[in-house]
Structure formats: C-alpha cells, structure tokens
Image (spheres, rainbow, N blue to C red):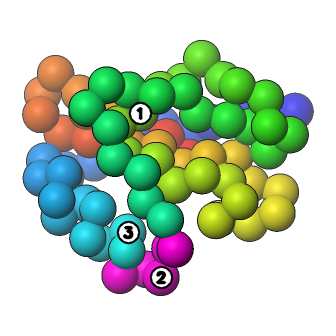
C-alpha cells in the first residue's frame, strides 16, 4: 500500500513553485484556489488535498500524485 510523506518547505510564492516544477520538465502542473484531492498509484482518491498538483501519470507509472498544500504559515507543504 502506498502512502504520502509530508515535507515542510520554505516556499511561499505559488508562481515560483509552479515555474520551478515546469522547469523540471513536468508536462502539466495543476493549480487550484481550493485544495483538490490527491490520488494514489492505483487511482484511489486519498484524503490528502493540495492547491498545486502534479498528477501521477506525469511522475511515473507507479507513482502517487505530488501535491503542495498551502499552510497557515504561508508556506507550501510538499505531499509526496
């Protein structure tokens, strides 16, 4: 069974986060005002949500979605 790991970041600017992900040659980065659910490697919807998401099909064939969730501190938490 897959699981997500949460990593604290110092990233505060959504536009810089999105541009950085695009520079990593990720073909699609989704950006939302309201957090959206992340999906596991089998396509199962998880309870975890994020505002910036790279869907699993753009990461690798056996990957989970990668998300970045805005925290009350103003920083984004990576959910990998």
Q: Is residue 19 above or below residue 41?
A: below
Q: Residue at x 18, y 51 (%)?
A: 14
C-alpha span from label 1 to label 3: 15 Å
The quadrant of the rendering that contains the N terminus is: top right
Q: Is residue 27 above or below residue 6?
A: below
Span shown in magenta? 23-27
Q: Residues within 10 Å of mark 3 (few under 14, many from 20)?
A: some
Q: Residue at x 69, y 47 (%)?
A: 64
**Residue named by callout 3:** 21
In the image, taking residue 3 as reference, residue 78 lies left or right, namely: left
- Sequence order check: which comes first, mark 1 or mark 2? 2
C-alpha span from label 1 to label 2: 20 Å
Q: Residue at x 13, y 47 (%)?
A: 12
Q: Residue at x 43, y 80 (%)?
A: 24
- Sequence order check: which comes first, mark 1 or mark 3? 3
Dot 2 falls on a residue whose secondary structure is loop
Q: Main secondary structure of the magenta part?
A: loop
Q: Residues within 10 Å of mark 1 (few under 14, many from 20)?
A: many
Pick the front one: 80 or 67 = 67
Residue 2 showing in the rendered view: no
**Residue named by callout 1:** 50
In the image, taking residue 43 as reference, residue 28 lies left or right, namely: left
Dot 3 falls on a residue whose secondary structure is helix
Tell me where residue 69 appears, x and y as whole percent: 34, 34
Tell me where residue 54 appears, x and y as whole percent: 52, 55
Tags 3 and 2 touching, CB below 8 Å: no
Q: Is residue 50 above or below residue 21?
A: above
**Residue named by callout 2:** 25
């Amino acid at each position: 069974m897959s699981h997500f790991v949460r990593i604290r970041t110092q990233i505060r600017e959504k536009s810089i986060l999105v541009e950085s992900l695009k520079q990593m040659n990720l073909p699609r980065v989704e950006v939302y005002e309201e957090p959206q659910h992340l999906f596991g490697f089998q396509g199962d919807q998880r309870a975890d949500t994020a505002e910036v998401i790279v869907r699993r099909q753009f990461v690798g064939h056996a990957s989970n979605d990668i998300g970045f969730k805005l925290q009350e501190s103003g920083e984004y938490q990576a959910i990998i």
